[in-house]
Image (spheres, rainbow, N blue to C red):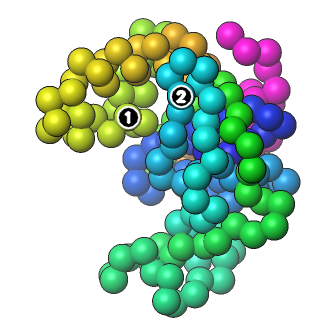
Amino acid sequence: MVDIGGVGVAVAGDSGAGKSTTLAALLARGHRLLTDDQALIDPATLMAEVCAPSMKLTPSTGSTPDPTLRVTRLGRKYHHVVAGGGFGNEPVPLRLVVIIERERNAPALRWEKVGKTAAAAELARHVMRPELSLRQGRAAILFRWSTELGRRVSVYRLHRPDDIGLLPDIVSQIEALAALPSL
């Protein structure tokens, strides 16, 4: 999650979709990191809390990895500490979720606003860690929370080709969506 002008924006998607690369590009444009991987959101207020000041990045994002900060023994990602003004210090309201889907053969970027009913399913799948809820017998809680969040937050799906050159366009569109009035 990132803070764009006082608005919480969550970037979700499957492994390898480009979430961390997108967040790193947003940070490079002056926005502040709230959290990487897991977010704490107050269900009553939708306020997203500030968490750990680090994110997991591959060297391909332009970061210089510290070999002692490898996420897993054989993994390609490294912990990258976000220093200085790049890390948020106050909770902000979650207003936008962008779900990135990498489509290798897609001809161009395609943005799709997700309707409120479909948003609940998308949030449950990409944001809420359903495997944990199901294993713990808490499917009803997952359903209620994802339905409520989908009703109150804008959700967009980004279909993107494998083209890092499109990253500035992706970041600009996320900034534009974050600037829209809330629901």
Instruction: Looking at the picture, tell me which residue is in the foreground, 133 or 75.
Output: 133
Could you say whether the residue bearing mark 2 is in a helix, strand or loop?
loop
The three-letter code of the residue at mark 1 reads Met
Per the image, is 5 magenta?
no
| Residue at image coords 59%, 24% | 46
Residue 3, position as x, y percentages in the image = 73, 42
Residue 92 placement, left or right of 157: right
Q: Quadrant of the N terminus?
A: top right
Answer above or below: position of 80 versus 30: below
Give the percent coordinates (x, y) of residue 36: 55, 54
State whether residue 55 appears in this view.
Answer: yes
Res 42 label: 2
Residue shown at 68% from the left, 10% from the top: 183
Return the residue at label 1. 128
Instruction: Using the image, determine if residue 43 lies above or below residue 161.
Output: above
* Region in magenta: 170-183
Q: Secondary structure at mark 1?
A: loop
Q: Quadrant of residue 121?
A: top left
